[in-house]
Image: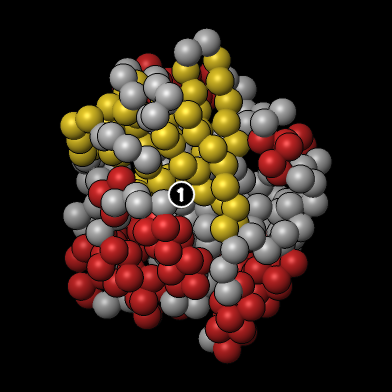
């Protein structure tokens, strides 16, 4: 399928950025409340993809997102689901724990999702771009070229540079890796708001998102989100989804760090608010 980019006009006012809902309905509902509290309109709320994933309520999550009216690009999970593929396309190493767990949660999502949900996924773009505070912003999932490429703060800049060049953007908003961070070089900004469906391996059950503000030209702030993680975990156990991921919702620690570069492995259990701004 050819890549599809939606080019919006100028976006004004506060913007909410987030990723990786991962079928976590409790987290999504909590985020919607935050958007309302901050007076952020649904059309100013942007997801970097992977609405579907590890947790227990894929269909309910999709339908709640649609009713909300926020915008999203396609994540690798939705891409695989809408194509009828038999794996999540997360680019996990074959035989790894993450790969093994995906053989449980991905078929569960396939079984739970309605035809209407799959049809809706077929309408989703690969990228969204818009102008914000005189800067061009483009949303990607992994990178502009590869939907499931893992990009972290420690990833060399040359792995990020092509996404700026190909989209002629000042800001790239990306997802996929599960950990919030930013990386600046000259006037360019790579911004990953984190995910709301799973903790960020910092030993806290809260999850992460970003708010942009154009009051003083341009600013961004990382926020953590509290939600009913106990219920989300209980539902995973009830549906016989991987216990390791249900435990992660409670502890804030990942089951393993197979996908993480060495630098991000050292972030485990540390104050991410300090690390993000380091």
Q: In which quadrant of the rendered view does residue 165 lie?
A: top left
Q: Residue 216: in sight, yes or no?
A: yes
In this rendering, the answer to whether 233 lies above or below 210 is below
**Image location of residue 90, percent across then percent down:** 50, 53
Please name the residue shown 22% across and 75% down the image: 115
Q: Secondary structure at mark 1?
A: strand
Q: Residue at x 73, y 37 (%)?
A: 274
The residue that appears at 61% across and 68% down in the rendered structure is: 101
Quadrant assignment, res 58: bottom left
232 or 56: which is nearer to us?
Answer: 232
Answer left or right for 198 relative to 190: right
Q: Is residue 189 left or right of residue 59?
A: right
Outermost residue, bottom side: 238
Q: Which residue is mark 1?
A: 18
Q: Position of residue 211 (x, y in %)?
A: 46, 42
Q: Between residue 118 and residue 134, name the one nearer to us.
A: 134
- What's the residue at 30%, 45% (across, down)? 44
Crowdedness near tag 1: few (<14), some (14–19) or many (≥20) residues, C-alpha within 10 Å: many
Q: Position of residue 237 (x, y in %)?
A: 62, 84
| Quadrant (top left, top right, bottom left, bottom right) of the C terminus | top right
Q: Position of residue 127 (x, y in %)?
A: 30, 39
**Which residue extends farthest top?**
186
> How many labels sit on residues?
1
User: Is 203 left or right of 17, judged from the image as shown?
Assistant: right
Residue 94 seen anywhere in this rendered image of the structure: no
State whether residue 232 is above or below residue 265.
below
């Amino acid at each position: 399928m050819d890549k599809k980019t939606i080019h919006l006009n100028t976006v004004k006012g506060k913007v909410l950025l987030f990723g990786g809902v991962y079928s976590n309905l409790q987290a999504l509902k909590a985020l919607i409340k935050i958007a309302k509290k901050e007076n952020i309109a649904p059309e100013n709320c942007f997801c970097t993809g992977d609405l579907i994933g590890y947790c227990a309520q894929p269909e309910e999550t999709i339908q709640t997102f649609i009713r909300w009216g926020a915008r999203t690009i396609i994540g690798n999970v939705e891409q695989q689901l809408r194509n009828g593929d038999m794996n999540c396309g997360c680019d996990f190493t074959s035989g790894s724990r993450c790969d093994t767990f995906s053989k449980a949660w991905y078929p569960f999502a396939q079984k739970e999702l309605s035809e209407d949900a799959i049809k809706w996924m077929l309408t989703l773009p690969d990228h969204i771009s818009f102008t914000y505070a005189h800067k061009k912003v483009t949303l990607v999932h992994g990178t502009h070229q590869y939907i499931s490429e893992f990009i972290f703060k420690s990833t060399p800049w040359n792995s990020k540079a092509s996404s700026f060049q190909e989209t002629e953007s000042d800001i790239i908003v990306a997802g996929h890796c599960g950990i919030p961070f930013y990386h600046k070089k000259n006037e360019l900004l790579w911004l990953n708001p984190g995910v709301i469906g799973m903790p960020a391996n910092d030993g806290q059950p809260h999850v992460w998102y970003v708010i942009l503000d154009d009051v003083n030209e341009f600013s961004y702030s990382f926020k953590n989100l509290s939600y009913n993680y106990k219920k989300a975990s209980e539902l995973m156990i009830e549906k016989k989804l991987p216990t390791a991921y249900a435990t992660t919702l409670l502890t804030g620690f990942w089951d393993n760090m197979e996908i993480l570069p060495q630098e991000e492995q050292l972030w485990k259990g540390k104050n991410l608010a300090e690390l993000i701004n380091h």
